[in-house]
Image (cartoon, helix red, strand yellow):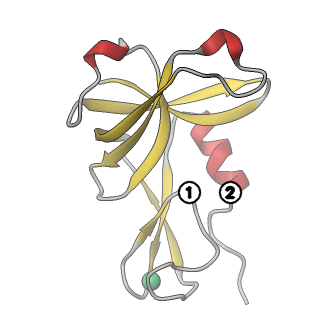
Amino acid sequence: MTEPVVTQQKFFEQARQGQLTAVRCGRCGALAIPPKQFCPECSQRAWEPTSLSGRGTIASYTVIRVAPRGHAGEVPYAIAAVQLEEGVSMLGRVVDIPLETLAVGLPVRFRPLTYNGQTTVGFGPR
Ligand SMILES: [Zn+2]
């Protein structure tokens, strides 16, 4: 057994620097982000790291109006599923885009969000 080439921890370290890194399955070519242990398509573990542009478009979104515990000051905000140029999609929090202008197909760009030392995925305007 070999270690995964990009661990979740490494993924978030790189995300913090503004670089999105996915893994591409060396067997079937599937992309995974964040990195997974086994390929969801073919159940193999033959990952190769691949850097993503961070550019994509909004595929769908949800406006959060009732805050999760501890986030009362942050609502409303939107969570979007973003289809990246490389063909994978991932969820991220929308920042710096007025909620009323959100639309499916809107171009966005990855942006790391760091709160209390924890990096999460965000998407802002291109
Ligand atoms: Zn695969």
Q: Which mark is residue 8?
A: 2
Q: Between residue 3 and residue 56, name the one nearer to us.
A: 56
Q: Under tag 2, what secondary structure?
A: helix
Residue at (50% x, 20% y) in the render:
77
Q: What type is the residue that disc 1 sits on?
A: Pro
Between disc 1 and disc 2, whose residue precedes?
Answer: 2
Tell me the crowding category of disc 2: few under 14, some 14 to 19, or many 20 or more residues within 10 angstroms, Cα based. some
In which quadrant is the N terminus drawn? bottom right
Residue 31 occupies which quadrant of the picture?
bottom left
Image location of residue 101, percent across then percent down: 26, 16
Between the residue at mark 1 and the residue at mark 2, the CA separation in whole angstroms equals 7 Å
Residue 60 occupies which quadrant of the picture?
top left
Image location of residue 75, percent across then percent down: 57, 15
Residues at discs 1 and 2 in contact (Cβ within 8 Å): yes
Which residue in the structure is indicated by mark 1?
34
Ligand 1 falls in quadrant: bottom left
